[in-house]
Image: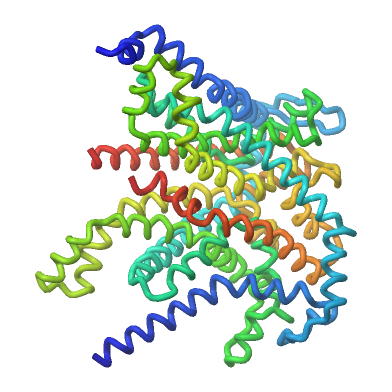
Amino acid sequence: MTRRRTGRLLAYVLLVVIAVIGFAPFVMIVIYSTKSRIEILQVPPTLDFDLDQIVANYRDVLVTRGFIGFIQNSIIVTAATVAISLTIAVPAAYAFSRLRFRARDRWASTILSFRFMPPVAVAIPVLLMMRFVDLENTFQGLIIPYVAFSLPLTVWILIGFIDEIPRELDDAAMADGCTRLGVLWRVMLPLMRPGLIVAGIFAAIFIWNELLVASYLIQSQGLKTIPLAAGGLISAQRPIDWNVAATVGVVTIIPIFIFSLFTQRYIARGITAGAVK
Amino acid sequence: MTAGTTREGHPLHQRRDVLLLVSPVVVYLVIFSLFPLLYSLTISFFRWDQIASTFHFIGLGNYQELFADPVFWQATGNTAVLVLAGVALQLFIGTALAIFFDMQLRGSWFVRGVLILPMLLTPVVVGLMWRAMLNPNWGIINYTLGQLGLPQPLWLADPALALPTLVVVDSWQWTPFIMVIVFARLQSLPRDVFEAAATDGASSRQTLWRITLPLLMPAIVFAGIFRAIDAFRSFDVVYGLTYGGPGRLTTTLSFYGWENGQRFARYGFSSAISYVMVVVAIIMVTLLFRHLAVRREDAT
């Protein structure tokens, strides 16, 4: 009995250790983001917080360095990409789930396989294409390839969700004289909401974090997305101001944090969508 | 027969519907994914003149240069370590975590939720975060080690430690991915198998090795291949954590390709690097699909 109790105690200790490893980095950069350039060099970091310093750091990052603008840019690019991807992907996913046609599974796998292509392999051609149509260094020029990146997984996730909706619903609606498109629009779309959310979340995470292709396509400071702006702290020739870097980290993480509060259950569901069936 | 099934059965209607529904995705991917991929293959046979904005055909010149380039081989080796050692580490810890969380300790759902966070983060920021914590002068990690009387290595500056440190940081971010997949599989397993094993007097170690792990294997393999393909193209975390250094010790193939393409405008050479990557990626994707196909047959 006591042996069992020690086992249980050890398990709880382990749980705490896991939580610390998972969460401590977040706590640390929040602490670093409250320090001045000098204070951050102090070990161990003190826990006395100076409100003026905190305000100064965050004002520096959000206003002076323009991160409010970068966050806006990321929101615009992400929202547009997700909206366009879903619009194109829904009909295709419906067809892959419901209609029978030659080499259907092969087509579906081919589409998914583009999810795994290294972005570095298409960055240069995409840059040259966008230059050709005069969309280099614009949001449109970034959104167009981003839609191509998010389509494969979006289609794939949606197929999984449509497969779970009973076929009898389609048949009943068609028997009532509804066309295929009518079924998709009136019957399926309302039922697909969780699928749209999961697919949207995954596209959004990818685009929100994308650095490589953006670094080819965007040069103007005013058009930079968050990863580009955060990366800009590093490529600068002078040493990194770590309190600023930490503040940038916090500012970047907070939107993700809030987002994950609302979407957590969908995230686990999306990751496992392809895996567990 | 109802009107509906007749309509569905009609081949002409059916074909028109398929065309209408599927073609937007196919056309989009052909123009903005497949075409760039082929374009990039073409570029790899050319030299880009940045000043004149023109390409000069040089045949296999870029590939010759590439295969004679020690940095390319270094980057290939680094990427291999990141994929093989990194994914192995993540699979081991991720599976262990999934089994641990399956014990359903009080509060473990919360810790599981917390562990979702790292994989949502911008990898550049993950790199920066860890670079701060690993700072040899004021970082929290070496301070803690010092307090415990342990050695305080120069994580990112020490040539022997830079790549292993990158592997660990990447694993911090991605082990939860494995955990989530394996945990979901574990939850979906029929419980009576375990009860039967217990009544037959199997020890918990026997149950783990003979029952749980074999049943989890499909999910572990899937997660491993999936993660390997992503680790293979690692770029951002390198950018944030080490910028490829010290020297070239943490430069990955993606990073080297990006450096040549984005920073030095050597489009042809960069595309040659990318193409080597594309070939490897295609092999890995084929493996993944073969695994998925086998799984589907299992299921039916």
Residue that lies at the very extreme toward the top in this rendered image: B12
Residue that lies at the very extreme toward the right in this rendered image: A64
In the image, residue A56 sits, relative to residue B60, either above or below, namely below
Image quadrant in which the C terminus of chain A is located: top left
- The percent position of residue B100, horizontal first and vertical second, equals 36, 71
- Camera-side residue: A52 or A234? A52
- The percent position of residue A227, horizontal first and vertical second, equals 72, 52
Dividing the picture into quadrants, the one containing residue B124 is bottom right
Dividing the picture into quadrants, the one containing residue A51 is bottom right
In the image, residue B168 sits, relative to residue A34, either above or below, namely above
Image quadrant in which the N terminus of chain A is located: bottom left
Dividing the picture into quadrants, the one containing residue A44 is bottom right
Q: Which residue is drawn at 25% across and 41% down?
A: B299
In the image, residue B47 sits, relative to residue A37, either above or below, namely above
Q: Residue at x 66, y 77 (%)?
A: B154
- Camera-side residue: B54 or B96? B96
- The percent position of residue A161, horizontal first and vertical second, equals 42, 38
Number of numbered labels in the structure image: 0
Q: In this view, does B260 lie to the left or right of A5?
A: right
